[in-house]
Amino acid sequence: MSHTKDSVVITDEVIELAQVLWDYHHMHHELIPSDAIFALGSHDLRVASRAAELYLQGYAPLLIVSGGLGNVTKGVWTVPEADQFAAIAIEMGVPADHILIENKSTNTGENLQFTGELLRSKSLQLQNFIVVQKPYMERRSYATFKKNWPDKDLVVTSPQISFMDYPNDEIPMERVIQIMTGDLQRIREYPAKGFQIEQEIPPEVWSAWEKLVELGFTKHLIKE
């Protein structure tokens, strides 16, 4: 087991509970050819690599990257998330003129709002999207997308990495679990605020959430 400076302990039980949340956050969608690949910006640059891979595999003729400096990257990065994502995609071989950049948004709702405005300004009528996001943000991204763009079709995917292999130096295990716990609470609470569509949460998933909260994983919970 390992201790963090906030005295949250990563035990085998915590890993087991967190795996339940990780599995729930995944949508397990099958990829289909679409009008655009839509990468949602974040601190995890592996999302950009996944989006570029899908473009290069021919899943869509257009790559949209969206994200300014959000809650996690503001004060850490100076270059907007979308610009970093675009640079990675270009380095991997995606033509620059096949990339649309929206670099002002600070959350998923703004990703959709500002990207919608960008598409309208370019008279682009797109119907089908492959949304690329962090693994533990798949379901919340889907629910936010369907609330904001109910007439559009999407599948959601993420870097193909297992829970145990996902943490790295920038995103340690404790942080991953803290964020997953906060995101599950938002999946439950945000529909009433008009931010997302409803998503069923199985009892065993909510039970795992309650245990993680009891064990101290409260850093990313909604502040009352």
Image (cartoon, rainbow, N blue to C red):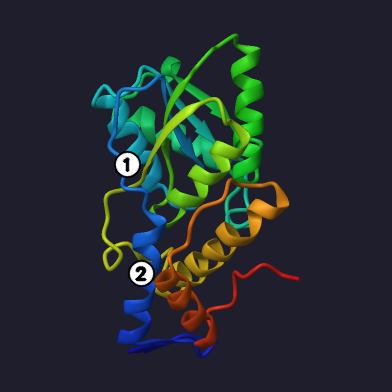
Q: Position of residue 123 (x, y in %)?
A: 60, 9
Give the alpha-carbon distance from disc 2 to disc 1, as whole Å. Answer: 18 Å
- Considering only vertical position in the picture, is 120 above or below 17? above
- Which residue bears the numbered disc 1? 29
Label 1, secondary structure: give it: loop
Quadrant of residue 31 within the rendered picture: top left
Label 2, secondary structure: give it: helix
Find the residue positioned furthest to the left: 57
Nearer to the camera, 104 or 12: 12
In the figure, is residue 189 to the left or right of 187?
right
- Considering only vertical position in the picture, is 91 above or below 135? above
In the rendered structure, find residue 84 and report the number of the disc placed on it.
Answer: none
In the figure, is residue 76 to the left or right of 126?
right
Q: Position of residue 17 (x, y in %)?
A: 37, 77
Q: Position of residue 165 (x, y in %)?
A: 26, 64
Q: Residue at x 47, y 62 (%)?
A: 201
Q: Are marks 2 and 1 in contact (CB under 8 Å)?
A: no
- Considering only vertical position in the picture, is 68 above or below 120? below
- Which residue bears the numbered disc 2? 20
In the figure, is residue 82 to the left or right of 98?
right
Which quarter of the figure is the C terminus placed in?
Answer: bottom right
